[in-house]
Image (cartoon, coloured by chain):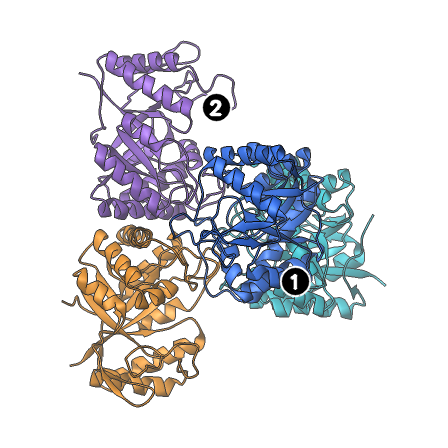
Chain colours: A purple, B orange, C blue, D cyan
């Protein structure tokens, strides 16, 4: 039976501010990426998120981002040294590990957030520094990498276990890269179309590009969103469609 | 041979800002308390501090404080719930553990910083929450407690290994508490007097109060400071005086 | 014709995080207190809030709080000096003044936020420091003070124009103080009861305490909330009830 | 008599952290650029700095930077919209204006800090947004612009009064731009050479490039530094050399 993981960013509030519908997404995702306090999240939100995930048998990962609360980690910060990126990744992983331990759960993966991830997908230095930060803390942590990005090579070089990620709601170029958000059609919005597309992607082990080209691609996890009601509906629809197609949805296993 | 530990707060810069003379203090202290990013410190400074400590064979501990960069953790923040204190302590410990792992060192103790410590010394809820945060992360971490404070009972109740701390440069009341900093004579400044006083304290296992009363007290570590040149000189003088008196200076061992 | 102002806290998001229903409240309030970046708010949210207020003919005031984004300014920060409070109030007023100027609007009042206000209501030093901060920037700014609190005396001593505020949804003690939120019944939730109560308060120039005592009190503005849908409904109901009772709702004028 | 202004960045501490020798530089500079809390500075440090400047008859300007305390405003933050830059500049100016008013002084100029300035020197959007932020608050504020940069055009388009700035300790390319800090020789360190060079620059109204080319350039102010003892010594030497050469050192006047 074909199996796929659905991963989602969670715990993205800060203090009195909330974001997204974490409770709903914890019913739909099988792995969650927990914000660690630099772009969102705080110790209390992390604790609640981890406890909810544990209660539902959902895997948790650290979701380190740039130090940028105001910009939600969405702005590239230019000029950080490799050691600075490595340390900020290590710090955030450790913070979540301690909270997870306190809650009786365990951090099993790491996925970079927002601009840190976007930059790393195209920049060797940043990609390697993220991998180095993970490896320095625990070389058995699973590195979630965007399929076809520079993160893949960085993870391989660091000999980290990896899972490859595709996006449910993003269009792909012929070369297997995501279509830039600046271009029209980069983000898909129709719940039915997204569900059909992902089912086919998982069944075929391939994405179809904007020009119709079929691109074979390893995919272990599909990124879903829960920051708006529309996003939750899309995720719910997708989960049902996968079930209807006989595809099992389950947390990813450690990959070679 | 009598042995005593000298502990010192370190890594208290932030970004481009420096504080204190860490290099000098790493020659004098045997245990250092590393700021973890909430009141001071950042991942890079933590990394450098841990690496320096490792190179010198100095023990490291987490030094969690309130979330208060601007106030350097010196202002009590009123109204935090026990769970919030527990989580912020756990978060900071974990962050340092990851950085320490990355640097090949290990966090062996925890000491609360500034206002968090001051509040806890007199407030059961805060003291217990700090102990709970430590225990939830790793019950083998040594809890550094101010001798005679509420921290002692909190650590005992949590069954944490503890070491008792006295201050080199603070006067004591007859009941064994520190003289409030608001009172004249609360802080000692004369290097010779401080050195003589600490040597006697360690030899006798007792402090002499402001009225001359001898108070027997368990003491495993003496807190020294390095934030000014004067402080460094006091610490250097003290270390020499202990040596001259035949007292060994070494990192504290895990205590029952 | 009796006239009353309705004031509401606005612009309380931060970066990507939103809070409350500002658009709805700008239809209901006649004066709004704009968060200035220390406990909530940022330059962009301030700009949007001021522009919306200007478009609706709503007065704006600065709403300075403690430096406490994570705690939303709700935790007392102990140990600040009078000069520190004065400066943080001045800074926040100035920031909003510049944003208001940029948007073609004008800051006409100041109301302290959250814990800063709560502390000041009972602490002379803090109350005087807030008044000093306002006066130092512009002595013609209207100081919004909780009726019967220490803020009144501080504003009088500073010779600031003042308006006295009552709460729509809070119970009062016999001495005219608010019932502590820790006591049952401190906060009212029934929209009809709140509307009836405020209409009577405005008509009588008095509040009725929890024991039924009628307490004469100057009242120029009523504080309303918009942080939940329920709060918006309460405010809408109140505004209609005031209209039905023939009470005009309009921004407060400068008071002697 | 030829007159030149010497400008220096000041008030760059934060909370308990200090930076630079403000007292020494206030004896040497005739205009100071005061950090406004986003990359450095806080209300108390701003107040102290403004009071010291007033006492010495030194002009003050706002020194707005990116929101980046940890990076000291030295990292470009990519992706900010023009309106976001305009608002953060306006906010910071206003905050300083209020503090200056409280201290009986007046903000007369604005100079962008660090990465915000560096980006703006080469990016029209950022340069125009800074000028727009200044103009929106007060069109009579003097805009300090790096001679030959994109800031000049932005200031002209906004019709702001401007002063042109040259650097005492930086080498220039043949096209009048600063030699990149990444190249050897970009920064000069010899106090005597710097003083001789600046005296000649002011006398000739020209800089000499790294290849010896003489480039005529309007210059109203020379940027000096005070962040290290060496920097203070260089500034002191320069001030004396200007005096010896019969060049008056005085705050810049509003320019057309």
For label 1, the SS is helix
Residues packed near mark 1 inside 10 Å, few (<14), some (14 to 19) or many (20 plus): some
Left or right of residue A52, residue D68 in this image: right
Residue plotted at (28% across, 63% down): B124
Q: Position of residue D16 (x, y in %)?
A: 49, 64
| Residue annotated with mark 1 | C156
* Both marks 1 and 2 on one chain: no
Left or right of residue D246, residue D35 in this image: left
For label 2, the SS is loop
- The correct choice, above or below, for A50 with respect to D203 in the image is above
Q: Position of residue A102 (x, y in %)?
A: 23, 48
**Which quadrant holds residue D103?**
bottom right
Q: Is residue D33 visible?
A: no
What's the distance in space between the residues labelled 1 and 2, CA to CA?
60 Å
Indicate which label's residue lies in the foreground, 1 or 2: 1
Left or right of residue A160, residue A36 in this image: right
Q: Nearer the viewer, residue C156 or D15?
A: C156
Work out which residue is located at the far right of the displayed protein and give it: D1
Q: Position of residue B153 (x, y in %)?
A: 21, 67
Quarter of the image for the C terminus of chain B: give it.
Answer: bottom left
Residues packed near mark 2 inside 10 Å, few (<14), some (14 to 19) or many (20 plus): some
Work out which residue is located at the far bottom of the displayed protein and give it: B212
Q: Position of residue B119 (x, y in %)?
A: 35, 65
| Residue annotated with mark 2 | A180
């Amino acid at each position: 039976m074909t199996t796929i993981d659905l991963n989602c960013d969670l715990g993205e509030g800060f203090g009195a501010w909330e974001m997204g519908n974490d409770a709903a997404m914890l019913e739909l995702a099988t792995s969650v990426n927990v914000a660690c306090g630099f772009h969102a999240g705080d110790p209390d939100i992390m604790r609640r998120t981890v406890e909810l995930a544990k209660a539902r048998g959902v895997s948790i990962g650290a979701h380190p981002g740039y130090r940028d609360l105001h910009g939600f980690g969405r702005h590239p910060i230019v000029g950080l040294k490799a050691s600075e990126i490595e340390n900020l990744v290590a710090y955030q992983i450790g913070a979540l590990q301690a909270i997870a331990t306190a809650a009786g759960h365990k951090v099993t993966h790491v996925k970079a957030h927002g601009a840190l991830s976007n930059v790393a997908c195209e920049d060797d230095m940043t990609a390697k520094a993220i991998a180095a930060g993970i490896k320095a803390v625990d070389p058995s942590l699973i590195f979630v990498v965007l399929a076809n990005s520079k993160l893949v090579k960085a993870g391989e070089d660091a000999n980290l276990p990896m899972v490859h990620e595709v996006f449910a709601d993003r269009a792909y170029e012929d070369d297997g890269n995501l279509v830039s958000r600046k271009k029209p059609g980069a983000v898909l919005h129709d719940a039915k179309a997204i569900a059909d597309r992902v089912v086919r992607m998982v069944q075929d082990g391939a994405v179809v590009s904007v020009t119709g080209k079929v691109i074979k691609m390893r995919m272990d996890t599909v990124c879903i969103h829960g920051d708006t009601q529309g996003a939750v509906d899309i995720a719910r629809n997708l989960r049902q469609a996968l079930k209807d197609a006989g595809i099992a949805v389950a947390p990813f296993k450690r990959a070679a």
